Image (cartoon, coloured by chain):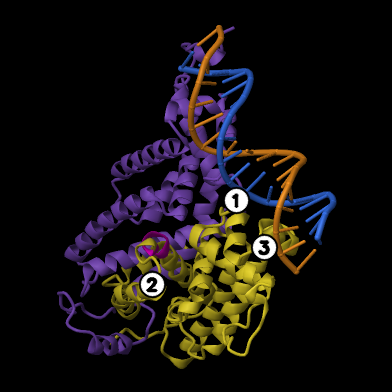
Chain colours: A purple, B yellow, C orange, D blue
Amino acid sequence: MADVRDIPTDRDTRPPAVDTVERIRDAAIMRFGRDGFGVGLRAIAADAGVTAGLVVHHFGSKDGLRRACDDHVLAFIRAEKTKAATSGTASMLLAQLAEIDRFAPMLRYLLRSLQSGGTMAAELVEHMMADAQEYLAAGVEAGVFRPSRDPEARTRYLAYQNIGGMLLWASMHLDEYQEDFAAAFRHYLEELTLPALELFSHGLFVDRSMLDNYLMYVPDPPSDGDAAPPAT
Amino acid sequence: MADVRDIPTDRDTRPPAVDTVERIRDAAIMRFGRDGFGVGLRAIAADAGVTAGLVVHHFGSKDGLRRACDDHVLAFIRAEKTKAATSGTASMLLAQLAEIDRFAPMLRYLLRSLQSGGTMAAELVEHMMADAQEYLAAGVEAGVFRPSRDPEARTRYLAYQNIGGMLLWASMHLDEYQEDFAAAFRHYLEELTLPALELFSHGLFVDRSMLDNYLMYVPDPPSDGDAAPPAT
DNA sequence: GTCTATATAATGATAGAC
DNA sequence: GTCTATCATTATATAGAC
């Protein structure tokens, strides 16, 4: 007898009885994100309602499946980022996406992938870095961000700290929020917004003696003056 | 015939033909750190010059072995930290330790463990957090750090960003420096010291309108005024 | 304490029927 | 396209000889 999933009907407004390949891929994204990349093909196959053999048949190997997941999530993130006109922090975009329950599996997968540091992670971070560079440069131009002696280094620093901090927080606290991904992100942002704004507004040091001291011991930095006026 | 390793001699100034249990544990720390926790018991056993069965015999299970490694590395880090009178950033301590080649395996293991987010990771981060809290409070008292409206939140923010940033950097770049762990850390610190000092000295924003705007929308913060004088 | 041999389970992947 | 059946490998863990 034919499986009911294979019969598209007019009432089916959901992703119209998605193709089996996509169903497997989505199941893999969910499993990988929830249980890590050590999970077996059989578990993924069962979630998708198929057998392990079929997974290999379609994706060649477990690694092929993983690549397919990477590609899909990466494409998704990029698409969503272009949609979100409000250029902001990477964390802000992710928090925004986390509000949509349907996206949670992909965000879980994304975090898991960043943790594992594969090819996708590198590509994604590099991509975020380029965006941040542009974002910061525009802010400097507009007079809201201070100039830096080494803008590229600053971008890298901020990006690594920002993404890494979120990642570490997630890897330690995400289990507490079993399914409510959005709540986790909200909590994360609520907790850290004040100190972030303080640091970004005042810095941490009372004076700039540490910086001046450092500048005396390093050769001439790439470019840019330090003509920014002191904060009021 | 007796294994030469079992015969301690006067010429043996190395860790004196270490006990088998310790040898297995050290091999595990190295393997886990280099290849991740998915590595098999056989590989570890081979490195230690024993069989897989003996590993289980001594540690009960793979998880028991992992716990033993956790305990040993954690104890090591704590001991070294108390030795290092110069209280500084967590990254600074690690960079300092990385200069000693003998410690590289344990640092690799540490990073791997933080990535995986187990119990040890949580305990270690919490520990670092408490230190940072003390460090920051002392700095505020001494007048070198600005006060914060929410010192605990600031500590958590800085700790997560700091550790997480280093972790992300490591997970993406560490492969490039195959064996030279110290060089990797040096490079990391060299690259990020300037932007860090800039941020800590000036902040990122030209003015504090973002902060003020935020403060208008949140209820009254925990404590502490904002009486810090402007930089310069 | 240490080894050999083995039990048992799960893995990724293949072959071939339908 | 999909499944069943199976292979070869590897995993952790156990049992018992020495």
Is B100 a magenta residue? no
Q: Which residue is mark 2?
A: B180
* Amino acid type, label 3: Leu
Q: Position of residue A3 (x, y in %)?
A: 56, 13
Residues packed near mark 3 inside 10 Å, few (<14), some (14 to 19) or many (20 plus): many
Q: Position of residue A192 (x, y in %)?
A: 47, 64
Q: Residue at x 59, y 70 (%)?
A: B26
Marks 3 and 1 in Cβ contact (< 8 Å): no
Residues packed near mark 1 inside 10 Å, few (<14), some (14 to 19) or many (20 plus): few
Tell which of B162 and A40 is nearer to you.
Answer: A40
Can you see residue B20?
A: yes
Chain identifier of the residue bearing label 1 in the image: A
Q: Residue at x 25, y 81 (%)?
A: A230
Chain identifier of the residue bearing label 2 in the image: B
Residue, far front? B1
Q: Position of residue A114 (x, y in %)?
A: 43, 53
Which disc, if any, is residue A100? none
User: Mark 2 vs mark 3: which is more N-terminal?
Assistant: 3
- Predominant secondary structure, magenta span: helix
**Left or right: B51 as drawn, with respect to B221:** right
Dot 3: what SS? helix
**Left or right: B223 as drawn, with respect to A16:** right
Q: What residue span does the magenta drawing correspond to?
A: B170-174
Chain identifier of the residue bearing label 3 in the image: B
User: Toward which corner of the image does residue D9 lie, by quadrant?
Assistant: top right
- The Cα atoms of the two marked residues, 3 and 1, are separated by 29 Å
